[in-house]
Image (cartoon, rainbow, N blue to C red):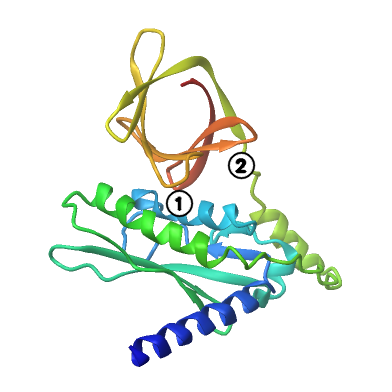
């Protein structure tokens, strides 16, 4: 009993230390593709990781995005999220780690596990544990805004390069026509007036977020400003569509 008590105290002290360090940050950088998977946002794991940190108030960017000046000029203004898998023959196991610019680990989520055989379902089930662990572990770690750094003197060559690589901001396309939500196991199928099944969505631990898929793509359905947004990757680019859904 004494040994268990000592270990619990150490864990609580470690969690407190992590929270104190996390309050110094505003940005979290998430890989567009985790190293143990072959595709960007495979099983929606990258998008789910991004959203759980956004829910805690962080500004979250993919590592393929154009970085704000305060991150581009000083990587130590951001934390870096990564997912680690430790799968076995019968179990899917994942956890999320946060590191700083010195590659020091500042937070580790609880390990999410699943015994489901289908990877698309197993990873989502395991992430429910991971996501809940992140939300609870960061509940007292509200990030503080970081004052922007003074910009460096402009250099003509750098400006030319920046203009050449500048990307258009992601725009949300409004999809016309109302969709109707019909209950299915663990979620809904969205049908149009035909009726034709347009999208199937599945519940997560967050009532404002579903995993979603149809015959051609898979992504996430998120509630933003009282509107439902379907986000997915197509040809390595993030696509955002606003849907009119009647539940």
Within 10 Å of disc 2 (Cα), the crowding (few <14, some 14-19, many 20+) is few
Residue 228 rendering spot, x and y as whole percentages = 54, 31
Residue at the far top in the pictured view: 194
Q: Which mark is residue 170?
A: 2
On-image quarter of the N terminus: bottom left
Q: Please report whichever mark, 2 or 1, sits nearer to the chain's N-terminal start.
A: 1
Residue plotted at (42% across, 43% down): 235
Q: What label does residue 48 carry, if any?
A: 1
**Is 16 situated above or below 37?**
below
Q: Is residue 79 left or right of residue 113?
A: right
- Left or right: where does residue 188 sit relative to residue 19? left
Residue 196 screen position, x and y as percent: 33, 14
Looking at the rendered structure, the secondary structure element under dot 1 is helix
Q: Residue at x 40, y 44 (%)?
A: 204
Residue furthest to the left? 89
Q: Position of residue 183 (x, y in %)?
A: 33, 24
Q: Is residue 164 above or below residue 154?
A: above
Residue drawn 64% across the image and 58% down it: 66
The structure residue drawn at horizontal position 39% and vertical position 68%, both measured from the top left corner, is 110
Residue 8 in sight here: yes
Q: Can you tell which quarter of the image residue 225 is in?
A: top right
């Amino acid at each position: 009993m004494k040994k268990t008590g000592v270990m619990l105290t150490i864990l609580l002290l470690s969690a407190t230390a992590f929270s104190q360090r996390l309050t110094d940050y505003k940005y979290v950088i998430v890989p567009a593709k985790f190293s143990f998977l072959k595709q960007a946002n495979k099983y929606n794991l990258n998008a789910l990781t991004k959203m759980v940190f956004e829910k805690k108030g962080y500004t979250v960017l993919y590592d393929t995005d154009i970085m704000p000046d305060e991150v581009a000029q000083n990587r130590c203004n951001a934390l870096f999220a990564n997912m680690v898998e430790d799968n076995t023959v019968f179990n899917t196991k994942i956890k999320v780690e946060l590191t700083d610019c010195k590659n020091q680990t500042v937070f580790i989520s609880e390990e999410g596990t699943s015994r489901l055989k289908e990877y698309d379902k197993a990873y989502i089930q395991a992430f429910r544990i991971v996501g809940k662990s992140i939300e609870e572990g960061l509940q007292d770690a509200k990030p503080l805004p970081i004052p922007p750094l003074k910009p460096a003197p402009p250099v003509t060559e750098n400006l030319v390069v920046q203009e050449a690589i500048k990307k258009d901001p992601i725009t949300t396309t409004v999809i016309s026509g109302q969709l109707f939500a019909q209950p299915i196991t663990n979620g809904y199928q969205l049908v149009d007036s035909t009726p034709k099944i347009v999208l199937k969505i599945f519940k997560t631990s967050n009532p404002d977020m579903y995993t979603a898929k149809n015959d051609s793509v898979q992504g996430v359905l998120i509630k933003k400003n009282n509107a439902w947004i379907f986000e997915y990757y197509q040809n390595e680019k993030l696509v955002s569509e606003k849907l009119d859904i009647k539940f």
